[in-house]
Image (spheres, grey):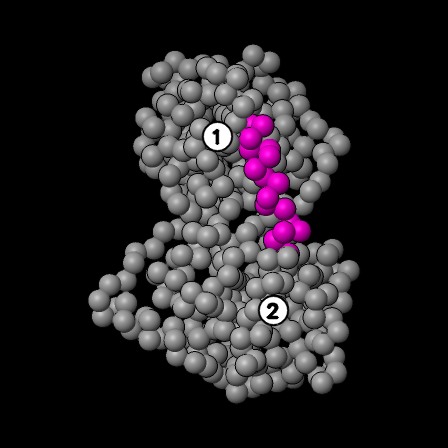
Amino acid sequence: MGINNKGLLLVANWDSGVGYAWWLMESFWVVLSETYSQTHRSYIAYPSISTIPDNIKNSSISLEISDFTKKNIADVFRQCKLIINNKIKIIYFSDQSFWHWRYLLFRLCGVDSIIVHDHTPGIRTKPKGLKKLIKSLIARTPYITCDGVITASNYLKQRAIEIACIPEKKVYVATNGLKNEKQENNLNIKKLLDIPEDKIVIITTGRAIDYKGIPFAINCIEYLIKTLKCTSIHWVFFGDGPNFNDYQKRIETSGLTSYISFPGKYAHIKNILRSCDFAFHPSQGEVGYSLSILEYMQAGLPVIVSDNPSVCGATNNKSNGLIYKEHNIDSACNAIISLIHNEHLIEKYGDRAKIDAKQYSLNNTHKQLKSAFISIENTANR
């Protein structure tokens, strides 16, 4: 078959202009379109299209509007129509179901391979007894189950095997990775935000939502300052989200504005990180190796994280950072204090973090992704 007779469908879950960590998925789409350029024409199905990212605009990928997050009969019919019209042979989903009845219809429409990339955060409960048996049977039922699962970390791989009961031979890992960029324009965060020079700056970046642990972080800072009298610190949170204003009000009513800054979303975080002392990442769950954590490490910052296995995968306790007991303010504050009072540890852990971050390069991620696709394709087409 020629290039015009095969299609590769790359499925987006959000509007084309959403942003956030979707730049990583966008890089995957571009790499896959280049990898399959000699045999397949590539398409991205967006639920809606507003701003088109530059890397997608500059690629050879064609754009379609179709919401694959919807699974009612009418929408599935429209999805099938898109598949038939574009002669789709491979579908690449992000954070979709590992099995679903519509997959059978997709295959009847000509699809050979369905691949799901799992970035979903959090801990799941292991199924037991009859529930485990049923899940295992479904996960091994042909046609309604995806042909391969790609996960963002070893923890997520084990979760797919143990919780979703996907056969191990169908699960692969493509760890999150960062571009190897030199930061030419490093900015001083103290000058930028008018923070006193004698303060130790603790940074957090992410979405302003409860799941990212921002209320817990505020509680920790308040405890450090008001109870433990650690007034030498200044915590900075960069990000925006639905709870941003609520957090700001909480800080104001608590009298913490001299110790906490909430500047909002900032486009050049990497240029600021090097002027901070260490990072605090209180998230309750992550999509494998959090890009924020990897950015802290790349900048040479020690990272303080909880022992939640979906959060602490890239952190080695007392090597490149510190791990505290999840939801435990005393444990988290003790970790923060141990760095506040030890400049040598900050430097030591930061140097190690910078070295360890090199294994999480975007080039390695792309190699792992392409290798997983080749293995899944070979198995699916036997």
Q: Which residue is mark 2?
A: 374
User: Of helix, strand and loop, which one carries label 1?
Assistant: loop
Residue 59: image location, x then y, percent: 75, 63
Q: Element under label 2?
A: helix
Q: Is residue 203 left or right of residue 43?
A: left
Which one is nearer the viewer's eye here, 325 or 51? 325
* Residue at the image position 67 percent from the left and 32 percent from the top: 271
Give the residue displayed 48% in from the left and 45% down from the top: 242
Is disc 1 surrounded by few (<14), some (14 to 19) or many (20+) residues within 10 Å? some
On screen, 8 above or below 254? below
- For the point 46% across and 15% down, the residue is 341
Q: Nearer the viewer, residue 190 or 316?
A: 316
- Depth check: give the residue in front, 208 or 331: 331
Counting labels gives: 2
* Label 2: few (<14), some (14–19) or many (≥20) C-alpha neighbours in 10 Å: few
Q: Which residue sits furthest left?
A: 129
Residue 225 % position (x, y)? 40, 18
The quarter of the picture where the N terminus appears is bottom right
Q: Quadrant of the C terminus?
A: bottom right
Magenta extent: 350-366
The circle on residue 319 is 1
First along the sequence among labels 1 and 2? 1
Helix, strand or loop for the magenta stretch, by majority = helix
Is residue 215 within the magenta segment?
A: no
Three-letter code, disc 1 = Ser
The answer to whether 253 is drawn above or below residue 362 in the figure is: above
